[in-house]
Image (spheres, rainbow, N blue to C red):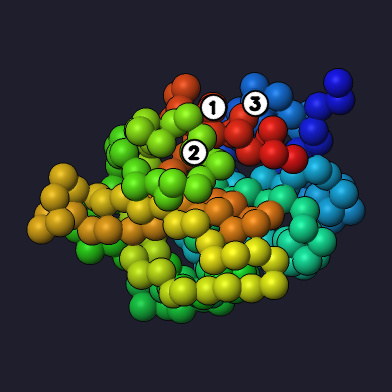
Amino acid sequence: MTRPHVAVLDYGSGNLRSAVRAMERAGAEVTLTSDRQVAQEADGLLVPGVGAYAACMAGLSAIRGQEVIGRRLAGGRPVLGICVGMQILFSRGVEHGVETAGCDEWPGTVERLQAPVVPHMGWNTVEVPAESRLFAGIADERFYFVHSYGVREWELVTNDRTRAPLVTWTETGPDAERGDRFVAAVENGPLSATQFHPEKSGDAGAALLRNWVLSL
């Protein structure tokens, strides 16, 4: 049986080697690439990302990554974003008072978390929609987060690709008074993304990546 081919997009951001190894363990044949044609033709495209929103968008623009993502989604070809690789899929990011345009696949703003302790680092359970395929068999597990920014309000969106997106939520703290609620993952037809790092989330993260690879 042929393994699905996943391209990990190299645009100068993300834990690239960790992402490659995690996708290989999930059962994919993996290519680390900045080549648009390779990224376009793969069965699945993984968009990693760490660091500043503006820097990630600059790196993505340098290789015309928005064009690759947009063309893949227009053709119903799967894309998975991780951490800042999820954040750049939204309309805009605001860091230190500077607004940067994102890929605009989803409306919404990436902004600083409103919590007593930032960055938010550690293991969280998540609130998963019942229809989720990405979290099949692992909805009650914990996942590893490390970030200072997130999407704190979901702006309802529907498009020609699919029904309304499935949005998974979590909080930075143990209760609503201390914590800040934010988007932990989104499933939207061929486009999926997680704010947490599945490649750092042990068995649960490995299972999530396998779920995605099996859907390719």
Residue 62's x, y, as percent?
73, 64
- Disc 1, SS: helix
Residue extending farthest left: 177
> What's the distance in space between the residues labelled 3 and 1, CA to CA?
6 Å
Residue bearing the label numbered 3: 26
- 166 to 74, vertically: above or below: above
Residue bearing the label numbered 1: 206
Residue 95's x, y, as percent?
39, 70
Residue bearing the label numbered 2: 135
| Dot 3 amino acid type | Ala
Mark sitting earlier along the chain (2/3): 3
Numbered label tally: 3
Mark sitting earlier along the chain (3/1): 3
> What's the distance in space between the residues labelled 2 and 1, CA to CA?
11 Å
- 209 to 41, vertically: above or below: above
Asked if residue 3 lies left or right of residue 102, the reply is: right
